[in-house]
């Protein structure tokens, strides 16, 4: 092998090694979705703004506010106050790891799955349904309700169907068993107070989401009003400039006529110049 050929092959080899090394980094940056609206929410410590992109591996925190994330063509997730989640994505599924708080999800009957995991408990929308449901962590318990369609709660090798119209399904998370009991969650009857609290948190999420949406609409309307006002001002200024030009032209014409009249008056004794 000539030294020239060797020198050409070494950079190509190093380039190939570099591409192989950074491939996992690109794979880990798979897009989850985009921010449809937010209030008092952060990703990685940075304030969340509308239209920002959420990537696999990102961590989202909501304080006294709300965050709305659009996934796929029509799926939506609304994260309520005091919520902490992180995101993962594979080829066909987006997974939300719920650390605390609550998430409301809307998922149409389309390819791709939204999954919410809290410890070893997994919640997914049932195929064949347009699903609207809520998952919340309340004092170590997990509460699942369905407003439309059906949610499937998977834990301990079992799958429980939570359909529209059924009572909230409650179970305790593994962290709620500190005394060395079974590591898996168990079904809990819950209390009316817990269910009422969950209903209140869901109402708070929906109210906050509506407020964010209305705020966005108000900002858009204000922007349009400012644009219209600027256009009107520009038109008025253009009209004023045209009027000024016309007045100047008229004054020049009058001065010219007066000068001409004065020059001709000696030859026409009866000519009067006003």
Image (cartoon, grey):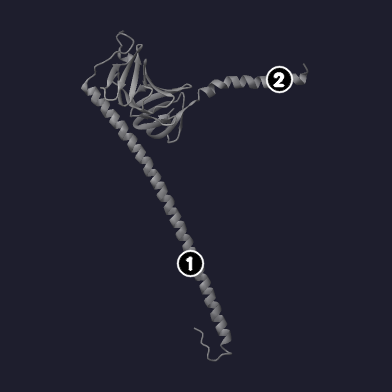
Q: Residue at x 54, y 75 (%)?
A: 253
Residue 208 visible at all: yes
In the picture, residue 181 is in which quadrant?
Answer: top left
Q: Nearer the viewer, residue 226 or 150?
A: 150
Residue farthest along the bottom direction in this orientation: 269
Q: Is residue 49 above or below residue 10?
A: below
Task: Answer with mark 1 or mark 2, whichever residue precedes in sequence.
Answer: 2
Find out whether the residues at labels 1 and 2 contact each other: C-beta distance under 8 Å: no
Residue 228 horizontal/vertical position (percent): 42, 52
Left or right: residue 35 versus residue 14 is: left
Instruction: Look at the image and tell me in which quarter the N terminus lies.
Output: top right
Q: Is residue 13 above or below residue 262?
A: above
Residue farthest along the left direction in this orientation: 192
Q: Residues within 10 Å of mark 2 (few under 14, many from 20)?
A: few
Residue 101 visible at all: no
Q: Is residue 219 above or below residue 69?
A: below
Left or right: residue 205 versus residue 110 is: left
Residue farthest along the front direction in this orientation: 128
Secondary structure beneath label 2: helix
Left or right: residue 239 versus residue 163 is: right
How far apart, in angstroms, are the residues tagged by discs 1 and 2? 75 Å
Q: Nearer the viewer, residue 122 or 161?
A: 161
Secondary structure beneath label 1: helix
Residue 243: mark: 1
Residue farthest along the right direction in this orientation: 2
Q: Which residue is mark 2?
A: 9
Q: Residue at x 37, y 42 (%)?
A: 217
Q: Residue at x 71, y 20 (%)?
A: 9
């Amino acid at each position: 092998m000539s030294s020239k050929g060797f020198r050409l092959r070494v950079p190509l080899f190093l380039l190939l090694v570099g591409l192989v090394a950074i491939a996992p980094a690109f794979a880990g940056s798979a897009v989850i979705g985009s921010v449809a609206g937010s209030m008092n929410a952060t990703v990685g410590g940075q304030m969340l703004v509308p239209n920002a992109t959420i990537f696999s591996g990102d961590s989202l925190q909501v304080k006294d506010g709300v965050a709305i994330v659009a996934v796929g063509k029509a799926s939506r997730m609304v994260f309520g106050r005091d919520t902490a989640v992180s995101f993962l994505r594979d080829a066909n599924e987006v997974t939300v790891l719920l650390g605390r708080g609550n998430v409301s999800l809307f998922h149409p009957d389309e390819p791709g799955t939204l999954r919410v995991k809290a410890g070893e408990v997994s919640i997914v929308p049932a195929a064949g349904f347009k699903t609207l449901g809520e998952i919340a962590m309340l004092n170590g318990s997990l509460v699942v309700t369905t407003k439309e369609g059906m949610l499937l709660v998977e834990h301990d090798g079992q799958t429980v169907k939570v359909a529209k119209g059924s009572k909230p399904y409650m179970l305790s998370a593994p962290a709620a068993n500190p005394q060395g009991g079974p590591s898996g969650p168990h079904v809990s009857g819950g209390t009316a107070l817990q269910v009422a609290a969950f209903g209140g948190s869901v109402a708070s999420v929906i109210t906050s989401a509506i407020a964010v949406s209305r705020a966005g609409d108000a900002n858009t309307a204000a922007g349009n009003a400012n644009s219209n006002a600027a256009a009107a001002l520009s038109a008025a200024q253009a009209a004023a400039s045209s009027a000024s030009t016309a007045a100047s032209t008229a004054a020049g014409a009058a001065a010219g006529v007066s000068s001409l009249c004065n020059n001709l008056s000696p030859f026409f004794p009866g000519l009067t110049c006003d």
